[in-house]
Amino acid sequence: MKETSVYSRVISCIMIVTCIPKAALAFSSSIQHKRMEPSLLMGTRLHTPPFMLMRPRNNLGRVNAPLCSTFSDKNNEEEAEEKFPEITYIDYDDPNYVVDQGLVDGEEMFAGGESDEETLEKWREERRAANDEFQFETYYRSIQSNGAEYRGEWTTYGSTTFIPESGFDRNENGGYPGIVMAKRVKKVISAAMRVLKDEGAERRCDQDVIVHEEFEITSEKGEETLKKTRDTDIDGGFGRHNDDEDGEDGSSSRTPILERYAPSEMRAFDFRGEQGNMCVGNAYTICNTIKLDELSENNDDHDGPFSEMRAEVGINGENVRMRVKFEYQILSDEEKTKKRPDLHLSTMTVCRERKGEWPSSSRDVELFGPPGARGGLYDPPPTGGEEQSNLYMWMDVEGGATIGFPYMITQDPDAFQHDGGLGHSWVLSLDWTPGKNRYQADRKFAGGEKIKGLKTFEVSEVEALESDKWRPKNGPEDMRQ
């Protein structure tokens, strides 16, 4: 991909925010990027200390070693082993190195031989099931804080693609839609509950499901949890205390949010990859879809085409978290007559949340500070050839975060075959610094009918003060497999 200069375009429309097309993730010629090759499903990346890495365990889970790196020079490897004895070093140039893709220890000895394929598949399934359990338990314990309640402020942005009354002219904006910020910031209480579903299941994680609940505070006057916030923080985070006309009697109104970005009942099996759910370290991604030819949710068949896709990417800090919800839809019901209609960005919601209490603008600078990650995305991912890259945009938001996303996703598996030869896939990115470390989470998914599933979920972690020093330099690439 050719390097281009970063540029911005201020869109003139009521409450339309500044959004920079990338050709969506446009890069300055002074910023170089690290080459990374693809992992099967997920992982994080490491270049050299002080980077942290949870390397994929069999490309599906986290390795037990706290740090991991690669060295092609034997002298450097030996020196590093002395300096960092707790680190596991892997030489990917070693011809004897085997990437484990679901195999059990020692199975590579049988691969290619006259082994019992049925036995091998049984071993693989046992390994996959163990990873399902690891992902399920990690998601509930680390990402959802064992069911703790999060309170936050949600800012929703709408695409003018679905707001014809905005009068926004895409032709005057290079074909890019406008991004309109809602006037009202929602106050929302969120939690994930672990519910017993099948007491007779053999494994503990198969007995339970995770149920997500989110409630919008539609009348704040009687909401007990907001009283202290009103007394101590006049701005209330974003300054939107919505003393609604309803609820004059002091009653609290908690309205369930029905749009789901995860399965209604999340099982351990839902972390296989094709379902689109995964967690790595303190980051995660989830997905939910609606089939094009039916109104019911997509259960065990995870291939499209779809009429709607909702995906979420989130990063947890210490008692705070930021997550971004992306909603894509077909343009109209008439589009259902097409075999594989395009999906267009409808809304994008930025959720700024604190565990157990409401966030405050005077305290939570990491949530409400100046907009934009320093220098844009830390490690801009590949976005295809020129034609596909022109479908991407990136946006700086309060809290020092930058978001990268396509405003349109094609469901045609043959799209962009002529466009640069980089492969047809998509990516949703979030770059945020919740403390001393900076994180970037990339949800990468295949094109065509496989858009629900994960190609990879990649997370970068680097000390915030050192991020410019260690910024990848070899251009946008996928992670090493």
Image (spheres, rainbow, N blue to C red):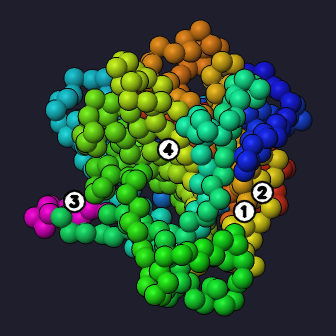
Residue at position x 57%, y 48% in the image: 348
Give the numbered dot on residue 327.
Answer: 4
Residue at position x 20%, y 29% in the image: 117
Vertical position of residue 441 compared to residue 64: above or below: above
Residue at position x 38%, y 29% in the image: 333
Give the numbered dot on residue 206.
Answer: 3
Q: Which residue is mark 1?
A: 399
Q: Position of residue 24 (x, y in %)?
A: 71, 33
Mark 1 residue element: loop
Marks 2 and 4, how far apart at CA: 22 Å
Residue 114 placement, left or right of 340? left
Marks 3 and 1, how far apart at CA: 38 Å
Marks 3 and 2, how far apart at CA: 42 Å
Q: Nearer the viewer, residue 160 or 213?
A: 160
> In terms of image quadrants, where is residue 451?
top left
Residue 273 placement, left or right of 444? left
Give the numbered dot on residue 178.
Answer: none
